[in-house]
Amino acid sequence: EPEVTQTPSHQVTQMGQEVILRCVPISNHLYFYWYRQILGQKVEFLVSFYNNEISEKSEIFDDQFSVERPDGSNFTLKIRSTKLEDSAMYFCASNREASTAKNIQYFGAGTRLSVL
Amino acid sequence: KQEVTQIPAALSVPEGENLVLNCSFTDSAIYNLQWFRQDPGKGLTSLLLIQSSQREQTSGRLNASLDKSSGRSTLYIAASQPGDSATYLCAVNQAGTALIFGKGTTLSVSS
């Protein structure tokens, strides 16, 4: 069964460093998402991406964050200068269509980001 | 602003019991509602999706209901098993993109 894959599974970085989290969405999906989950907290929406541009973003997704689809398969989340509070599990998700009641978002296994 | 609440936060039951997990949301203008399972340190597995026009969905031992007008959904698990132990998350989709999640119910089923 097709799945969303994320790499790496765990990323450790020093505060102030740039990190890139990678995702390969399901191949025929058109909408891509990033969410994060701080330990013990709710899963929070960061950004959605369609047709090579951001379609929606939350207040969490500030200028330190960016997303890109550099080729036909990868979808990346970049954090320019990491802070301690960026430590969280980051989930990528995708679906084929967004604006219908039938759409299911499929999630990857996540990347655990630890900022030291 | 949409808020999603799940009660109870944690639940412990012996194997074989039927149980109900609750989810409530403040804004009834939703496209759909999804129930997910999350194992410790793992990703989210979609269990059931209920469209806004539907009242319930079933998959195996799971049955999810939706009462949109009252802002409530329940996930019913029949004949619980130790393998059902996980955190169950409820999420609503309002405008077609972002999912808004509850904090989850952590279920522990003892053998």
Image (cartoon, rainbow, N blue to C red):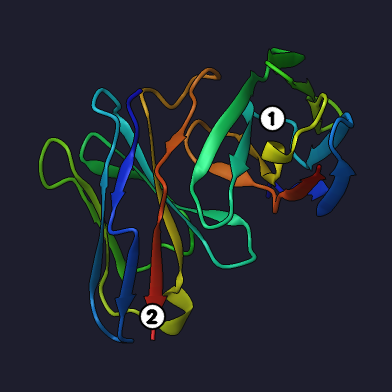
Subunit of label 1? B
Numbered tag placed on residue B29 in the rendering? 1
For the residues beneath circles 1 and 2, the answer to whether they share a chain is no
Say which element carries label 1: loop
Q: Position of residue A25 (x, y in %)?
A: 29, 36
Subunit of label 2? A
- The residue tagged 2 is A115
Tell me the residue at 78%/21% (across/down): B65
Tell me the residue at 35%/65% (across/down): A10
Q: Position of residue B91 (x, y in %)?
A: 63, 39
Which quarter of the picture shows residue B9?
bottom right
Report the label total: 2
Q: In this picture, is B65 found above or below B70?
A: above
Tell me the residue at 45%/74% (across/down): A87
Mark 1 vs mark 2, CA separation in Å = 38 Å
Crowd around label 1: few <14 · some 14–19 · many ≥20 (10 Å):
some
In this image, A111 relative to B8: left or right?
left
Quarter of the image containing the N terminus of chain A? top left
Q: Position of residue B100 (x, y in %)?
A: 60, 45
Front residue of A89 and B70:
A89
Does the image show residue A50?
Answer: yes
Q: In this picture, is A28 found above or below B107?
A: above
Front residue of A31 and B56:
B56
Amino acid beneath label 2:
Val
Numbered tag placed on residue A81 in the rendering? none
Amino acid beneath label 1:
Ala
Q: In this picture, is A27 found above or below A109?
A: above
